[in-house]
Image: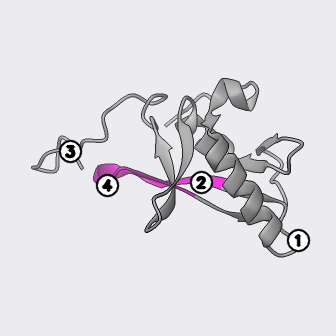
């Protein structure tokens, strides 16, 4: 799949809510000294759809987009992940029982609904 990588500032490419930014800053500050950012990744594909997540990063790769703000927020995203995440929103939800990052509107850049027509069932 030849995916064109968008360019621009973070606000032009993805929306990271204030709640998600605050939690990312908190996680980075609480991590080991060599951790400088979180990395957004995209994996999988096929009928199960894509998986979106985050992990700690100690340094950027040379092809990464680096998103940072003065408040300690720093996020890396490689061109493939950015291609899938363009137009998406990263949010953080904590209802007192479950706390998790949520990836909204992740199909905006590549089209589709998340359903798999060849699996013999409704959307996943």
Q: Main secondary structure of the magenta part?
A: strand
Of callouts 1 and 4, which one flags the residue occurring earlier in the amino acid sequence?
1
Give residue 78's position: percent from left, percent from top: 69, 46
C-alpha gap between disc 1 and disc 2:
20 Å
Q: Is residue 45 left or right of residue 40?
A: left
C-alpha gap between disc 1 and disc 4:
34 Å
Asked which secondary structure carries label 4, the reply is helix
Of callouts 4 and 2, which one flags the residue occurring earlier in the amino acid sequence?
2
Q: In front here: 117 or 87? A: 87
Residue that mark 1 sits on: 34
Residue that mark 3 sits on: 123
Structural crowding at the residue carrying mark 4, measured as other residues with C-alpha within 10 Å and reported as few (<14), some (14–19) or many (≥20): few
Q: Which mark is residue 106?
A: none
Which residue is at 63% across, 47% downward? 19
Viewer-side label of 4, 3: 3
C-alpha gap between disc 1 and disc 3:
41 Å
C-alpha gap between disc 2 and disc 3:
23 Å
Give residue 120's position: percent from left, percent from top: 10, 49
Q: Which mark is residue 48?
A: 4
Asked which secondary structure carries label 2, the reply is strand
Residue that mark 2 sits on: 41
Structural crowding at the residue carrying mark 1, measured as other residues with C-alpha within 10 Å and reported as few (<14), some (14–19) or many (≥20): few
Viewer-side label of 1, 4: 1
Q: In front here: 90 or 107? A: 90
Q: Which residues are magenta?
A: 40-53
Of callouts 2 and 3, which one flags the residue occurring earlier in the amino acid sequence?
2
Of callouts 4 and 3, which one flags the residue occurring earlier in the amino acid sequence?
4
Number of dots carrying numbers: 4
């Amino acid at each position: 799949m030849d995916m064109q990588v968008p360019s621009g500032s973070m606000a032009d490419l993805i929306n990271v809510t204030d709640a998600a930014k605050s939690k990312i800053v908190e996680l980075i500050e609480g991590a080991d000294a060599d951790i400088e950012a979180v990395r957004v990744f995209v994996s999988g594909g096929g009928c199960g759809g894509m998986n979106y997540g985050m992990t700690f990063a100690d340094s950027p790769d040379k092809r990464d987009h680096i998103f940072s703000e003065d408040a300690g927020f720093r996020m890396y995203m490689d061109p493939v992940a950015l291609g899938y995440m363009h137009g998406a929103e990263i949010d953080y939800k904590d209802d007192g029982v479950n706390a998790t990052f949520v990836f909204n509107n992740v199909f905006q850049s590549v089209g589709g609904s998340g359903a798999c027509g060849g699996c013999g069932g409704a959307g996943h």
